[in-house]
Amino acid sequence: MKQFEDLRASELYCPRCKVARPVREKLLLVLPHSELHDYRCAACGDSLGSREVKAAPIVAPRPGTGG
């Protein structure tokens, strides 16, 4: 669904802490068509998941349009 494309986690369950904890999002990798982000527990620092953000497609101007 379009409405969930930009969903970001604020809390996730941490197996080490055994409770849902706030997370910090860290940019791991920038690729030509996406970015990979890692979610880390704010309390213990364990990695709790990841999120891939797709880049918007780059649209080249059509020849003869002057742009």
Image (cartoon, rainbow, N blue to C red):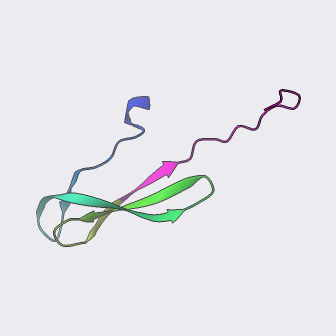
The magenta region covers 50-67
- Residue 26 horizontal/vertical position (percent): 37, 63
Q: In which quarter of the image is residue 28?
A: bottom left
Q: In which quarter of the image is the C terminus?
A: top right
Determine the main secondary structure of the stretch shown in magenta: loop
Query: Is 7 on the left or on the right of 31, as rendered?
Result: left
- Residue 56 horizontal/vertical position (percent): 58, 42
Q: Residue at x 20, y 65 (%)?
A: 42
Q: Residue at x 61, y 52 (%)?
A: 33
Residue furthest out toward the front: 66
Q: In this view, does 46 lie above or below 37?
A: below
Residue 59 is one of the magenta-drawn residues: yes
Q: Quadrant of the N terminus?
A: top left
Query: Is 29 on the left or on the right of 50, as rendered?
Result: right
Query: Is 13 on the left or on the right of 53, as rendered?
Result: left
Residue furthest out toward the top: 65
Q: Nearer the viewer, residue 43 or 16?
A: 43
Q: Which residue is drawn at 46% across and 53% down?
A: 52
Q: Which residue is drawn at 63% across and 41% down?
A: 57
Q: Which of 61 and 38 is in front in this view?
A: 61
Residue 9 is one of the magenta-drawn residues: no
What is the number of callouts on the image?
0
Asked whether residue 20 is in view, the answer is yes
Asked whether residue 1 is in view, the answer is no
- Residue 35 horizontal/vertical position (percent): 51, 56
Q: Nearer the viewer, residue 16 or 7?
A: 7
